Image (spheres, rainbow, N blue to C red):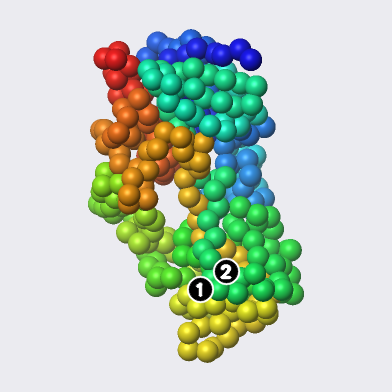
Amino acid sequence: MDVIFTDVAVIGAGQAGLSAGYHLRKAGRSPGDGFVMLDRSPGPGGAWQYRWPSLTLRTVNGVHDLPGMAFADTLTGASPDKVTAAEAVPRYYRAYEEKFDLQVQRPVTVTVVCDREPRFRVEAGETVLSARGLINATGTWEKPFIPHYQGAETFRGRQLHTKDYSTPDAFTGKHVVVVGGGISAVQLLDEISQVTSTTWVTRREPVFRDSEFGPEAGRAAVAMVEERVRSGLPPGSVVSVTGLLLTDSLRAARDRGALQRLPMFSHIVPDGVVWADGSTVRADVILWATGFRSALDHLAPLRLRGHGGGIVMDGRLTTRVAADHRVHLLGYGPSASTIGANRAGRAAVSELLETLRIR
């Protein structure tokens, strides 16, 4: 098995990975000995290529430009209501990869990264890299999170995660319990409640806002997550800071009663869910819109996690692993947002190349 020697291994070619690739190119590094990008998906698009068909450019929560090329440059003249995110974003990413000649290798799944001081060994089937530095941008799509509730295994209906959602028509005639208080949860709740009956449950009381949150709320959200990862705690949700934007479609959902939220149930029974006070709701489907966790299992041999369950991070935009400055995590903590991923790509490349020169 041949080993490819390179300065930087970039794992993942979603928005964060492509941003890193662009800035590596801008810093004078070339694909091959300068950097190698690996991606597990069959084609460009990151997690966007797997989004549900009803998620259009009108309803999506923002697609931000990658550095050096505007998203609008790849759009056709079709109405935003007609163009799906799963079609438009992969087309944009493909054009981006070609324009900057990033030479992404796919489909390649990285299974393990080991420290072979002073280099890393990156194993991905028949592909093996020996890299001086590592930029991990694997995101969260491959790690859907479903919390455990007593009795879940006895439920006779269907349980699925946001990752498995396709269209609301699959639930026609069924009562659906939607669990989760994030943007995806309310978007899916809106769609499903138009074709069938629903119950919405969340751990916290949702907070809606009537307009886009401003710079102050954005800074507060980033600061909250940054504080957690700098202290080694797992990144938390930012919805509690930013709130949920009350769009026209959500106002319509509220008017038809779909946004009447209930607190979290205590356990699950074969035909529904039960609260601590004994009240019940019959359910045919439980949709867990409960988010994702960072896909970092392949980094386990590096022993990056601390006692708090997270990874202590530092650096200008909190992408650098404090315990090993040769490793940067994009899409983890403050860089998990689409805006944050772009800014973090530049900072991570700058800091990593500086570290590699020092070593």
Compared across the picture, whether 19 is left or right of 54 comes to left
Q: Vertically, is 150 above or below 237?
A: below
| Amino acid on which the number 1 mark rests in the picture | Val
Q: Amino acid at mark 2?
A: Val
The tag earlier along the polypeptide, 2 or 1, is 2
Please, is residue 27 above or below residue 318 in the view? above
Counting from the top left corner in percent of width and height, residue 16 is at 45, 33
Residue 150's place in the image compared with 42, above or below, is below
Q: What percent of the width, then of the height, locates residue 240?
A: 35, 62
Q: Are marks 2 and 1 in contact (CB under 8 Å)?
A: yes
User: What residue is shown with label 1?
Assistant: 201
Q: Which residue is mark 2?
A: 178
Foreground residue, 321 or 123? 123
Q: Which quarter of the image is occupied by the C terminus?
A: top left
Crowd class of label 1 (few under 14; some 14 to 19; many from 20; radius 10 Å): many
**Residue shown at 54%/60% (left/top)?**
146
Residue for point 39% across, 20% down = 117
For image coordinates 48% across by 89% down, the residue present is: 277
Toward the viewer: 212 or 111? Answer: 111
SS class, disc 1:
strand
Q: Give the secondary structure at mark 2.
A: strand
Q: Residue at x 32, y 29 (%)?
A: 324
- Label 2 to label 1: alpha-carbon separation: 6 Å
Residue 330 placement (x, y as % from top left):
41, 35
- Whether residue 214 is visible, yes or no, is no
